[in-house]
Image (cartoon, grey):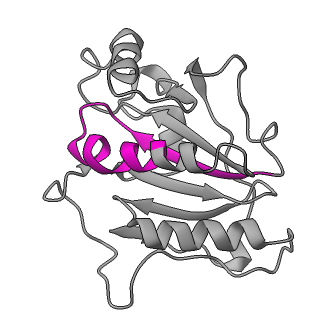
Amino acid sequence: MSARHLSTETLTKAPDWHVSQWFNTQEDLTLESLRGKVVAMVAFQMLCPGCVSGSLPQAQELARLFQNEDIAIIGFHTVFEHHAAMTPVSLQAFLHEYRITFPVAVDAPGKGGEAVPKTMAAYEMQGTPTLVLIDRQGRRRLQAFSHVPDLRLGAALAKLLAESGDADMPVISTAAPGEDHQDAGSADGKCSI
């Protein structure tokens, strides 16, 4: 797993989202509208094996478990390959078939036809699946490329939920001691850009 460690010195507001369409919500969601909640943003592609087998079921379970809590689970369909196959129409069918009920954004296309969508570029994501945790003040606290094990994610969310909003809280990491943080490729189902 590749986890981006964000030092307290660089703890700043998470980049804004660039959304061309929403599913499973009646309103357009923004980080500002979710202020006061912990946000678990799950970036995925519907043709990414690691997303379909690990990250999306985990996000669906989180949405079910924390539906009345201070956690917002947000999916981000951020397509950087196979654009013709992964249209919003295809995504709508995918969400229905896989019974995805949490809000899902379609990442806006990159400028001038670039392959990397705008939100993916703003967050400097390496590929999918990517998990981003954003604290109650709208600050990006963790970013992990690959599936995050349930226990590590649960501990990170519990810590963020327990925070009072102090700016000096430590940054959370999901990486185990000695883990290689520079892995890439698709041996574990990740899709790299």
Would you place residue 44 above or below residue 1 in this image? above
Give me the residue at 40% from left, 64% from top.
Answer: 148
Give me the residue at 63% from left, 50% from top.
Answer: 66
Give me the residue at 47% from left, 28% from top.
Answer: 110
Q: Residue 91 location, x and y as percent?
A: 37, 19
Q: Residue 100 location, x and y as percent?
A: 44, 30
Would you place residue 98 above or below residue 84 in this image? below
Would you place residue 119 above or below residue 130 in this image? above
Does the magenta-highlighted stretch encompass residue 94?
Answer: no
Q: Is residue 11 at least partly visible in the picture?
A: no
Would you place residue 97 above or below residue 163 in this image? above
Question: Where are the magenta residues, as a range?
Answer: 37-60
Q: Is residue 107 at least partly visible in the picture?
A: yes
Number of numbered labels in the structure image? 0
112 and 19: which is toward the camera: 19
Where residue 171 sits, quadrant-wise, is bottom right
Q: Residue 146 location, x and y as percent?
A: 34, 58
- Tell whether 59 sits left or right of 128: right
